[in-house]
Image (tube, rainbow, N blue to C red):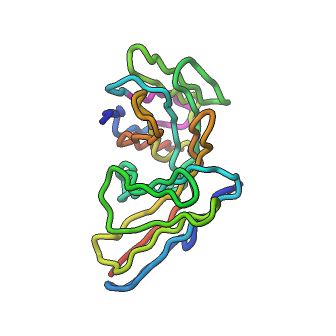
Amino acid sequence: EADIYQTPRYLVIGTGKKITLECSQTMGHDKMYWYQQDPGMELHLIHYSYGVNSTEKGDLSSESTVSRIRTEHFPLTLESARPSHTSQYLCASSRSSGANVLTFGAGSRLTVL
Amino acid sequence: GIQVEQSPPDLILQEGANSTLRCNFSDSVNNLQWFHQNPWGQLINLFYIPSGTKQNGRLSATTVATERYSLLYISSSQTTDSGVYFCAVESLGDSWGKLQFGAGTQVVVTP
């Protein structure tokens, strides 16, 4: 049962196109995250958010940007996609109090030709 | 930042076998989680276990925080256990709570 939703699941797009990966959660979590994962590799944090109007860059530098206008919504945008952006993007969320247990979405697999 | 090392990197098991996966970390932690990533890429949280021992069906986990390691046990493995197992930790000194992931252990369970 998914409480965090990512769309699209798969996207193949040409170089130079603008893309937005959507992430929504219904759990009322304050914290949200975007991780990037290349096939067979570990996850790297690229963006995170404490709450509405709060966004921070993660440990891995990324050309993508994020916004947090609503608690439940944390979209990621690439203004001009390039082949180097080909990867899986995983969205996650967690509560701001108590144990910081992450719940992940199913991921968005992006291929830039 | 905190370093997370998982071993072994790959594991092939016959159905019914038992196995142990290990996660070593370089600093004190206040959060440790084990995840299973299925072949379709979905990450499922298995355990939140910053210390102590927990069991969930055929899976169990133990974290010895003072010695900076955690173990994940898979008993009577099934083909559905295949996938990548990740350990993720949050450093005690991290005021925000960012998880650092290890490189994972790829598990293949054969019939």
Residue A8 forms part of the magenta stretch: no
Q: Taking A13 as reference, is B80 left or right?
A: right
Would residue B80 be visible to someone looking at this image? no
Residue sitting at the far top = B66
Q: Quadrant of the N terminus of chain A?
A: bottom right
Question: Residue B86, percent across and down?
Answer: 45, 40
User: From the viewer's perspective, is A56 left or right of B37?
Assistant: left
Q: In which quarter of the image is the C terminus of chain A?
A: bottom left
The x, y position of residue A3, in whole percent, is: 68, 56
Residue at position x 48%, y 47% from top? B83
Q: Residue A18 versus residue B93: which sits nearer the camera?
A: B93
Depicted A27 relative to depicted A16: above or below: above
x, y percentage for residue A71?
63, 59
> Residue B62's spot in the image, x, y percent?
52, 21
Is residue B77 visible from the viewing direction of this image?
yes
Question: Residue B66 or A57: which is nearer the viewer?
Answer: A57
Q: Nearer the viewer, residue A76 or B82?
A: A76
* Residue lying at 49% horizontally and 21% vertically, measured from the top left: B63
Q: As drawn, which residue projects farthest toward the front?
A: A53
Q: Is residue A81 above or below residue A37?
A: below
Give the answer, above or below, for where B39 lies relative to B33: below
- Magenta part mainly helix, strand or loop? strand
Q: Residue at x 57, y 28 (%)?
A: B75
Highlighted range, magenta: B13-23
**Side (left or right) of A86 relative to B13:** left
